[in-house]
Amino acid sequence: MLEGLVLGTIFATIILFLVLFLAWRFRAVLIFFWHEKILVSFVNFLSGMSKEERILSWVKEHAMAGNPQSVLDAIDYYCYNTEWAMNVGDIKGVIMDRIVEEAKPRVLLELGTYCGYSAIRMARLLPPGARLFTIEFNESFASIASQMIQLAGLQDKISILKGSTQEIIPQLKKKHEISTVDLVFLDHWKDRYLPDTQLLLESGLLRKGSVLLADNVICPGAPEFLQFVRGHPRFQCTHYPATVEYLRMRDALEKAVFLG
Ligand SMILES: C[S@@+](CC[C@H](N)C(=O)[O-])C[C@H]1O[C@@H](n2cnc3c(N)ncnc32)[C@H](O)[C@@H]1O
Ligand SMILES: *[C@@H]1O[C@H](CO)[C@@H](O)[C@H](O)[C@H]1NC(C)=O
């Protein structure tokens, strides 16, 4: 009887410490979900706006119309100081800038527009005549992005294609008169990275030297995609370690150059 009680107490104590240890070990993830799932819904309810509408309204107040850098700076400032959001952010953004400048793309494709941050980031570096197509299936995000791009003055360089990547990629050649793409930025849901890479290959949209650039290959991660491009004899890969946008957790970009 007493023995059972003692054993039970020891067992419960071990479990309690285990739970506390795990909560501490993964505190960043817990805080993140508390913020994203609970606090954001509460603030949406109070403000009658979505987080993305709040970002847009901040940018309208703090950026200079026609100045893409000021739009990026305003978004980054808001997301560091007020609310986290899933833009690629300034740390990985600087790495992207370098890759875009090296690749000198004329036709760019982005999978996952969200508020237009990375589209503005890439398009601001493009020479006259170069075009960026960005695919987004969430209507409200597409509408925010369209206003953000207008504000940055980049509406002549960027076209938002509304719909899912799996439906739009096979139509790019015929419907949008694209023969091949020079650079693809993959930043949509992570389980689509591999099937959409295969779609790009099947649709004949990649040429010798086309660059795939994938965000979040560590956090939340895209292991099937990484395994595919790294194991594929026609892709040459480079890993760019960085951190998750606006946070200190580890993440990385992966560049995969198609060798034709
Ligand atoms: C991480 S956000 C993109 C962030 C953006 N590239 C930036 O850095 O500013 C991912 C976006 O992809 C969109 N998305 C996810 N899966 C998609 C799909 N299969 N087709 C089209 N859009 C998709 C989501 O609605 C979301 O807006
Ligand atoms: C778009 O995203 C918002 C915010 O996550 C969500 O509330 C809404 O239901 C989404 N809309 C569609 C059409 O998926």
Image (spheres, rainbow, N blue to C red):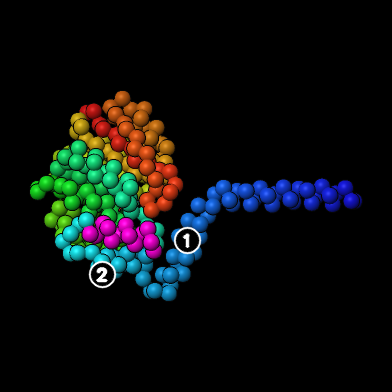
Residue 66 drawn in magenta:
no
Disc 1 target residue: 35
Q: Relative to the observer, which residue lies in front, 156 or 135?
A: 156
| Residue name at image x 37 percent, y 67 percent | 50
Residue 118 in sight from this viewpoint: yes
Q: Say which amino acid is labelled 2.
A: Glu
Q: Say which amino acid is labelled 1.
A: His
Secondary element at image label 1: helix
Furthest-right residue in this view: 1
Q: Earlier in the sequence, mark 2 or mark 1?
A: 1
Q: Relative to the observer, which residue lies in front, 195 or 218?
A: 218
Does residue 256 appear to the left or right of 16 in the view shown? left
Q: Give the magenta-colored segment's residue range.
A: 70-82
The secondary structure making up most of the magenta span is: helix
Secondary element at image label 2: helix
Disc 2 target residue: 61
Confirm if mark 1 falls within 8 A of ligand 2.
no
Residue 172 vertical position relative to residue 68 in the rendered view, above or below: above
Q: Residue 51 at what x, y percent from top left? A: 37, 65
| Residue name at image x 64 percent, y 51 percent | 19
